[in-house]
Image (cartoon, rainbow, N blue to C red):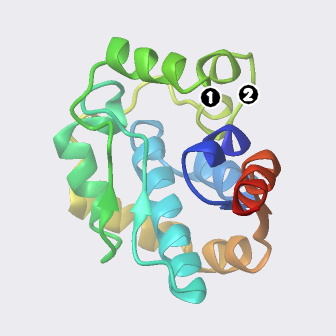
Amino acid sequence: LAKRLTKFGSSIRLHLVPFTDIQQHLHKEAPSNYQMTLMRRMMLRISERIAQERGILAIASGESLGQVASQTLHSMNTINEVTNLPIIRPLVTMDKLEVIDIAKKIDTYETSILPFEDCCTIFLPPDSKTRPKREHANKFEKYLEVDHYIDDAVNRTESIQISNVNKVEKEIEDLF
């Protein structure tokens, strides 16, 4: 998907975060109805740390309001609490059909629907909160001692540069 998106701009730096240890810890120790909220908060903490280390000024997210339990206003508010960076959400007001339409137009739809177990589906709890409370999330995180998991994930993150070689070659050809 990242490779396909390069045709709409410059190269993309993809950050591959080893997140499994955090998910296993949350799955084992956190209340099931708060696991998704806590997981998303961990993702934002890690994203913010990576951004700070690399001079990135914002976090981009593909969230669409109301599509899943972690994308309600209450959930987003509780999740956002852990970062001071702006979060850019270009799809936030679109419904599922609008997002699918855009994905088809930019040639990412077929790739996005391929069967693939990602970090949100493997550990999907049966009963995610749609109105999680900040104070509960903070208490759970204190009990779960998540800081060393975050440090480990940040330290083991790999970054790769993805560019659209055809686009670069075309731009060079156009110079001559």
Label 2: which residue?
117
Could you tell me the amino acid type at mark 2?
Glu
Residue 111 on image: x %, y %: 70, 22
Mark number for residue 121? 1
Q: Residues within 10 Å of mark 1 (few under 14, many from 20)?
A: few
Residue 151 on image: x %, y %: 66, 80
Q: Residue at x 41, y 26 (%)?
A: 127
- Give the side of residue 87 with respect to residue 116, left or right: left
Q: Residue at x 32, y 44 (%)?
A: 90
Query: Is residue 58 positioned above or below 76 on the image?
Result: below
Q: Residues within 10 Å of mark 2 (few under 14, many from 20)?
A: few
Query: Does the image show residue 14?
Result: no
Q: Residue furthest top?
A: 97
Q: CA distance from mark 2 to mark 1?
A: 6 Å
Q: Residue at x 51, y 86 (%)?
A: 52
Query: Is residue 147 positioned above or below 39 on the image?
Result: below
Q: Residue at x 47, y 37 (%)?
A: 32
- Give the side of residue 100 with respect to residue 91, left or right: right
| Quarter of the image that includes the C terminus | bottom right
Image quadrant assignment for residue 1: top right
Could you tell me the amino acid type at mark 1?
Thr
Mark number for residue 52? none
Judging depth in this view, the residue of 141 and 121 nearest the camera is 121
Image quadrant assignment for residue 120: top right
Callout 1: helix, strand or loop?
helix
